[in-house]
Each structure stands twice: as C-alpha cells, then as structure tokens.
Image (cartoon, rainbow, N blue to C red):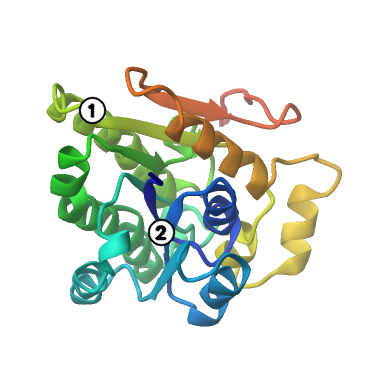
Amino acid sequence: MSKTALITGATSGFGAAAVRRFAAAGWKVIATGRRAERLAPFVDEFGSEAVHTAAFDIRDGDALNAAIDALPADFAGIDLLVNNAGLALGTAPAQQADLAQWQQMIDTNITALVTLTRRVLPTLIARKGAVINISSVAATYPYTGGNVYGGTKAFVKQFSLGLRSDLHGTGVRVTSIEPGMAQTEFTLVRTGGNQAASDALYGDAHPMTSEDIAEQIFYVATLPAHLNINRLEIMPVTQSFAGFQVARG
C-alpha cells in the first residue's frame, strides 16, 4: 500500500525535486505552491492517481484549511509532511532592512509552517507518520544580512526539536534538514531577480542541487520506523565555516 506525502513549496527547487523523487518511488504526493502553472506538469508526468496539486498561498490560513478539507479520499491519509515552503528576502543589514520583507519571511517560514503542521498532526499521529522541516545552516551560523531569515530558520530547527519531544510515544518521527549552499531560485528570490548575483554566488562553487536535497529528504522518510534523524546538516564540500568579525579603531 503506497504512502502519501504532503510537500509544500513544490513549484521549484527542493520541493519540486522532492515531488518527483517521491512520485517516482511510488508514493502518492500532494504538491502545493502558489503557482498553479508550475504544479500542473507533475500531474502530466505522473498522473492524477499519483499526484494531487493544490495552488494557494501558504500564508493564507483559510486557503490552507480549504485545500486540506478538499483532499480526495485517496490522498487524505497523510503519512509524511515536508514543510519546505519558505524564502529569504533582502541582503541588507538589520538597520537598513525592509520591515515588510521581514514580516513576509516570518509569515511564510514560521506562521504558515506551524499552522499547517498543527492542522495535519492528528492524521500523522493516527498513521505514525513523519514531519520533515526544511531549515538551513543559517539557523546555526550567522552571517551579515542573514538577520530575520536566519532567525526564522532557527525557529524551524528548535520547533522541530520541540515537536520531537511533544510527540514522544506517538511513533511520529520529526527531522530538521539544514542545507547549506544549493543552487536553486533562492538567490533570485532574495535579490529580486538579480541573475548576476545568483551567478556570482554559485559560479565555480560546485553547490548542492535540488536533487541532492530531495534525495536526503527521501532517505530520512524511508528509514525504518524505529529510527529518527533529529537533525541533518548538509553542505557542499566547497562550503565551510568562516572566522569571527572584528571591528577595530
């Protein structure tokens, strides 16, 4: 009997790659995101029996609940929640940052994530399922301009640990996956479409790919039921840790 995964942020990057990885392995997949035209190809590729799409803005709580309520019976038994939807906006230091961008990151990376998680937890508990939250190395290692983005991902990391504690004894597994540099639309979104900035960041750096991260999500999700990966931090070999900043004078 196939299992069902709900994957948010499925219109690009990690989410799109994860939809393809799970569907190709025989899972039923609920793929969500804002852009319906990017979700439709999944149904063309795998069929409506394998992939159900739901286009909505995850920050809209009413739309989120309506999408869950409207799930076909064959997709209603969710075994895995992959909280992937999220974004970074802006690279300015805190004192110059756009407050509206900060709020959008909080609304998307934190509020929407906890809203969806709370909504599907009863089903996950009943089915002894799993939650995989996509955090970031920015949750652990600060950098200039990371401010609220790093803060939201630190929340995701800590929330994952808290869920793991609260769900003790239920059989539900919880994992925080914390990627470093991966070449997706991430930098284009962050910089408002600056292709040169994206090219400069990833050029000759051999970054991870969306497929690399999707493979790790699939690995965690398909471990034996008695095993739990609490945190999985992953970087490309070319990325490591920098020193402390020191202001002089």
Which residue: 18% across, 48% down?
A: 123
User: In front: 197, or 44?
Assistant: 44
Mark 2, Cα crowd under 10 Å, few <14 / some 14-19 / many 20+, is many
User: In front: 96, or 202?
Assistant: 202
Residue 190 place in picture, x, y as percent: 56, 62
Residue 193 place in picture, x, y as percent: 65, 72
Real-space Cα separation, disc 1 to disc 2, in angstroms: 20 Å
**Disc 1 marks which amino acid?**
Arg
- Rendered view: 212 above or below 4: above
Asked if labels 2 and 1 touch by Cβ distance under 8 angstroms, the answer is no
Farthest residue to the bottom: give it: 37
- Left or right position of 163 against 96: left
- Rendered view: 193 above or below 147: below
Q: Earlier in the sequence, mark 1 or mark 2?
A: 2
- Rendered view: 6 above or below 121: below
Residue 178 place in picture, x, y as percent: 48, 35
User: In front: 124, or 160?
Assistant: 124
Say what secondary structure mark 2 lies in: loop
Which disc, if any, is residue 164?
1
Say which residue label 2 marks: 8
Image quadrant occupied by the C terminus: top right
Farthest residue to the right: give it: 204
Residue 224 place in picture, x, y as percent: 40, 22
Which residue: 48% across, 39% down?
A: 136
Which disc, if any, is residue 93?
none
- Left or right position of 121 against 186: left
**Disc 2 marks which amino acid?**
Thr
Say what secondary structure mark 1 lies in: helix
